[in-house]
Image (cartoon, rainbow, N blue to C red):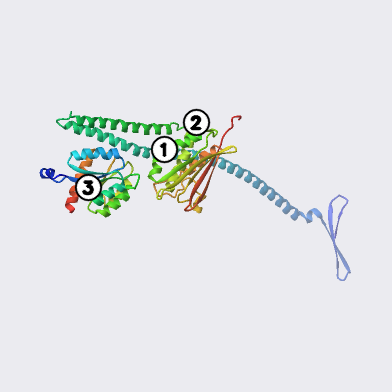
Amino acid sequence: MGTKSDSSGNKNIYIAAFLKNKDWLLVYQQRTADAFADLDKTFAIAMVLMLIGLSSIAIMTFTLYQKVFKRVAKADIEKQMMRKKVIETGKLASVGELAAGIAHEINNPVAIMVEEAGWMGDLMEDVAFDEPENRVEFERAIEQIQTQGKRCKEITHKLLSFARQTDSTIEDVNIKELLEELVAFSHKRAKYSMVEIHTDFPENLPSLKASASELQQVFFNLVNNAIDAMDNQGGRLTISCRKNQQYIVIKLSDTGKGIAEANLERIFDPFFTTKPVGKGTGLGLSICYGIIEKMGGKIEVQSSVGAGTTFSVALPFTTEAS
Amino acid sequence: MTRSQTDIKPDPLRLLLVDDEKSFVNILAKRFQRRNIKVTKAYSGADAIRELRSSEFDVAVLDLKMEDMDGIEVLKILKIMDPQLAVIMLTGHGSAAAAKQGIELGAFDYLTKPCELEALLEKIMEAYEHRLRRK
């Protein structure tokens, strides 16, 4: 078998074979193009198909990539909006809790004032109501009304200073003052739950560039959670503050029931709660997480069931030079 | 209570007033005494239990939120000591759940603080009559 070009330049294939005990030799000649026509045609079709296949894969990859990219970008925007919404919802929830607490605090002094005024009315019904002993009673009742009125004023004043800033304006925040204010505010609630609050705040901590109301929200949530964790049996909440390199680290340790290991990974997830239905929104910690992350800080938790939980919050501060 | 008083008037209602807000207990006691109610003041859950151990009462007015003990716990103990005692609970706003629990535990009724003296008096009289009927 072999190939050879003829005089007109066409390639031919020659095949030779002996027939009948080498008496005959059969020589067969065919043009190469003719012999391989089917194969070449198939090859050409295969190439075209492959090209079409490859280009459609390329186009698909490109469009899919574009679609996925767009979807991820959209999801990112949605996530941000969601987080903002979650923070706002949480703000409402903590405002609600605060309002309930305030209503309770104010009820007692108001009840006393109402009764004292009523008592004065009782005395005035007496025929001889200008007797000296009634006069003493009147003076005492008026004094009581004044004292209790002042008590109401103090409560509302405290509430106002606590909730003064509901926006997230960045300012210089003295973390020690903020935490002390918060402890004073939670004192009554802690007392009802038989929780002792101990504080360890050093002087001369650098100030933070942050939103005071957001920081209040973070620590209000953490303190409330700690008190909740010790609600049935009472306990001790220790709040400490330390400067560590470029961070101020605030630790809140309670002696409450602790967090089960299975739940530990999920506590910062929105809507995750172990509290009974209607008691917790499951938003507190996820909001804390969002706020701290936005500030470039970190929040960590350590817990052992039955022994208690420690939350540490590290917040970056800017030095005078920067 | 002196003999001469009871000769003229019927036996005054014996009321146990339990609240850790001393000023509130004191002024309420004065106003009730003026309305011929014999008031015993208790400034804590422990005080209330001590008072009930030494004397008998017709009606108790019990604040649910006190610093030494949970009002519901006090209610449980008072009802064990004297199942006939008619207890009216005073609750803060938004404590309907606790009040409901109290009624399940045998409290007569509840009022939200601050309440009108007349409303409280009316409730006390209702509770008293209820107790007399059950006796």
Quarter occupied by the C terminus of chain A: top right
Instruction: Determine the secondary structure under disc 3.
Output: strand
Is tag 1's residue or tag 2's residue first in the polypeptide sequence?
2
Q: Residues within 10 Å of mark 1 (few under 14, many from 20)?
A: some
Please tell me which residue lies in front, A120 or A61. Answer: A120
Structural distance between the alpha carbons of marks 2 and 3:
55 Å
Q: Comparing marks 1 and 2, which lies closer to the viewer?
A: 1
For disc 2, the marked residue is: A169
Q: Residues within 10 Å of mark 3 (few under 14, many from 20)?
A: many
Q: Is residue B35 visible?
A: yes
Position of residue A66 measured from the top left corner of the image (x, y, whole percent): 60, 42
Structural distance between the alpha carbons of marks 1 and 3:
36 Å
Q: Amino acid at mark 2?
A: Thr
Q: Chain of mark 2?
A: A
Outermost residue toward the bottom in this view:
A21
Q: Amino acid at mark 3?
A: Val
Q: Comparing marks 2 and 3, which lies closer to the viewer?
A: 3
For disc 3, the marked residue is: B59
User: Horizontal placement of A127 versus A4: left or right?
Assistant: left
Same-chain check, marks 1 and 3: no
Please tell me which residue lies in front, B51 or A217. Answer: B51
Structural distance between the alpha carbons of marks 1 and 2:
22 Å
For disc 1, the marked residue is: A185
Same-chain check, marks 2 and 3: no
Q: Residue at x 58, y 43 (%)?
A: A67
Q: Residues within 10 Å of mark 2 (few under 14, many from 20)?
A: few
Q: Residue at x 26, y 39 (%)?
A: B26
User: Horizontal placement of A96 versus A204: left or right?
Assistant: left
Instruction: Determine the secondary structure under disc 2.
Output: loop
